[in-house]
Amino acid sequence: MADNSAAQAAAISYLFVPASRPDRFEKALASPADAVIIDLEDAVPSEEKDAALQHLLTALEAGAIRAVHVRINAADSQWFERDLAALAQLSEVARASLAGVFLPKAELAHDLQRVVEAVQGGQRAPEVVALIESARGVAAAREIAAVPGLSRFAVGAADLSFDLDVEIVSATVDWVYAQLVIESRLAGLAAPIASPTFEIADVAAVEREAVRLRGIGATAQLSIHPGQLPAIHAGFLPAPERVEWARRVVAAAAATDGAAQVDGQMVDKPVRERAERILAQVR
């Protein structure tokens, strides 16, 4: 299987599919999602946990049409040790089909370290993502960020808002995003993955929320339905007029060794670097 590291780095959308529904795997993998997460946790009823794990392992062993991510069960659940053991015992074929692992309700650096150790080995190290869903997880963010092998944070706003007794869309949850953006920057991690939007029918609302989340520092978003994906991509990618502005800024900066102006704005180093980042996001 081809190396998926570049695709992982550029991923904007992560689509969940329940591990208990193997009939949906192929459809999810054929969707425009940048990454697919086969979910062993919240989407799977307790009585189906064992069957769900077997469905996942079968798919990995078969070699999916592209590598998949897996959300395992939380460290305080009865299935965590089972999931870690299954990851550690993957064959080379199955390991090549694993793009990454999400640890939900991440609160302890030690738990993330155990996940990293379970997926080490092979030709490509999978992503390891810490889902922050509680006050304890927020408080431990700096220690979690320091775990070698951690790729990035993600936010589970439903559980987080319940734990904090606030609305899902609130200044408190936005403050958590800001904290994780800063901790990610300090640790050299990719910026956080935003929580999924639970609106499905109103795609304009999905796009508006994606734009808002990108504006506060997230660079990707979880998704619970394929219908959300075009709106997520539109919301997280720079608008066409912003891309055109960036091209003119870069061209103006390249045309002179001195000061340049674009739309009446002085093009200095921070402006040029922001324009270059916008163009890099489009590429």
Image (cartoon, rainbow, N blue to C red):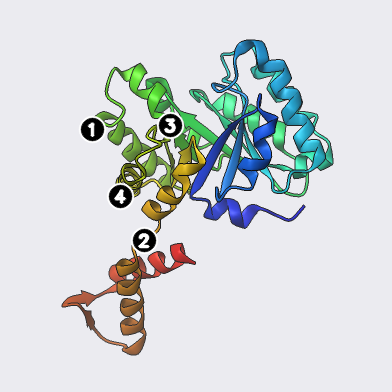
Q: Compute the Cα span from label 3 to label 2.
A: 29 Å
- Amino acid type of disc 2? Pro
Identify the residue position indicated by label 1 in the image: 171
Q: Are marks 3 and 2 in contact (CB under 8 Å)?
A: no
- Amino acid type of disc 3? Ala
- Amino acid type of disc 4? Gly
User: Which is nearer the N-term, disc 2 or disc 1?
Assistant: 1
The quadrant holding residue 23 is: top right
Element marked by disc 1: helix
Identify the residue position indicated by label 2 in the image: 238
Element marked by disc 4: helix
User: Which is nearer the N-term, disc 4 or disc 1?
Assistant: 1
Mark nearer the viewer, 3 or 1: 1
Residue 61, image x, y percentages: 81, 37
Q: Compute the Cα span from label 2 to label 1.
A: 24 Å
Give the side of residue 169 with respect to residue 104, left or right.
left
Residue 49, image x, y percentages: 67, 17
